[in-house]
Image (tube, rainbow, N blue to C red):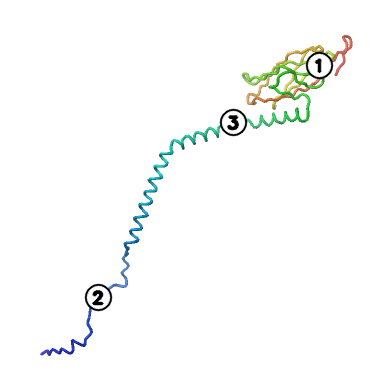
Amino acid sequence: MTVYDPSWSRHQPSRTATPSVSPHDDRPRIGFLPFLAFLFVSGFLWTSQTSLRATVQDNQPELEALRQQLAATEAEVEALRSSVGAQSQDVMAMKLGEVYRTPGVVDLGGTGAQILGHGFAVTGLALEPIAGGHLLEGRLINLQAVRHQELVFGVALGHQKTEFTLADLEPGQSLPFSLFFDDTEMAMPRFARFDYRESIIWHRASEPADD
C-alpha cells in the first residue's frame, strides 16, 4: 500500500525536461544577418557587371575607332623605321657637304648649279625610279679655262657606286650624263657624291697634259 506524503512533494526540487544535445552535432547554422549580407553583395556584383557591360557596349564605336587609329600609327612607325637607313645616309651626307664643306656632295633636290670642286659643277639633277633601279641624270659644267678629254667622274648614291666618262668638255661648256643604279631596294636619297677621277687636260690646242 502506498501512502501519500504531501511534505515530500513540497521539498523536492522541480524537474524540467531539457533536450539532449549530442556533442558531435556539427550541422551548419546560418544566421539571418550573414544571409542578408550575402544577398546584398550578390545583388551589388550583378548590378555592377550589368552596368559595366552596358558601358562597354555604348563605347564600342569609340573603341573601334581607337583600334583603327592605333593600326594607322603602327603603319606610320613601320614606314619610318624602314626609312631610317636612307635618312641617316642623307643626314651624314648633309653634314659632310654643309658642315665640313666636303666638295662633291650635292643635293639631288636642289636647283641651279652646285659646285663639285676641281673646277667643275653640276646642274639639272634628277633622280627617278625606273624598272630595275633608279636613273640619275644631269649636266656637268666645266668652270675652267682648259679643255678636258676622256673626263671620268665617279658617283656614289647610297651604297651604290658607278662612274661616267665624257669624251670632250670645252671650257665654260656643259655636257649631259645619265647613270643607272640597279638597286631596286634603295630608297630615294636626297644627296649624292661626285668625285673627279681623271682626264686629259689641254692647256692649248697643241699641248695636251695628263692630270
Circle 3 residue: 79
Q: From what the image shows, is residue 96 above or below residue 201?
A: below
User: Which residue corresponds to the image point at 67% horizontal and 20% vertical from the top-left?
Assistant: 127
Q: From what the image shows, is residue 2 above or below residue 185?
A: below
Say which mark, if any, is on residue 143.
1
Q: Nearer the viewer, residue 186 or 34?
A: 34
Identify the mark nearer the N-term, 3 or 2: 2
Dot 3: element: helix
Type of amino acid under label 1? Leu
User: Which residue corresponds to the image point at 39% horizontal and 45% vertical from the top-left?
Assistant: 51
Question: Distance between the Cα atoms at labels 3 and 2?
Answer: 89 Å
Say which mark, if any, is on residue 18.
2
Identify the mark nearer the N-term, 3 or 1: 3
Q: Nearer the viewer, residue 86 or 36?
A: 36
User: Which residue corresponds to the image point at 72% horizontal and 28% vertical from the top-left?
Assistant: 94
Residue 157 placement (x, y as % from top left): 70, 24
Crowding around mark 3 (Cα neighbors within 10 Å: few <14, some 14 to 19, many 20+) is: few
Type of amino acid under label 3? Ala
Q: Is residue 148 left or right of residue 58?
A: right
Question: Distance between the Cα atoms at labels 1 and 2?
Answer: 129 Å
Question: Distance between the Cα atoms at labels 3 and 1?
Answer: 42 Å
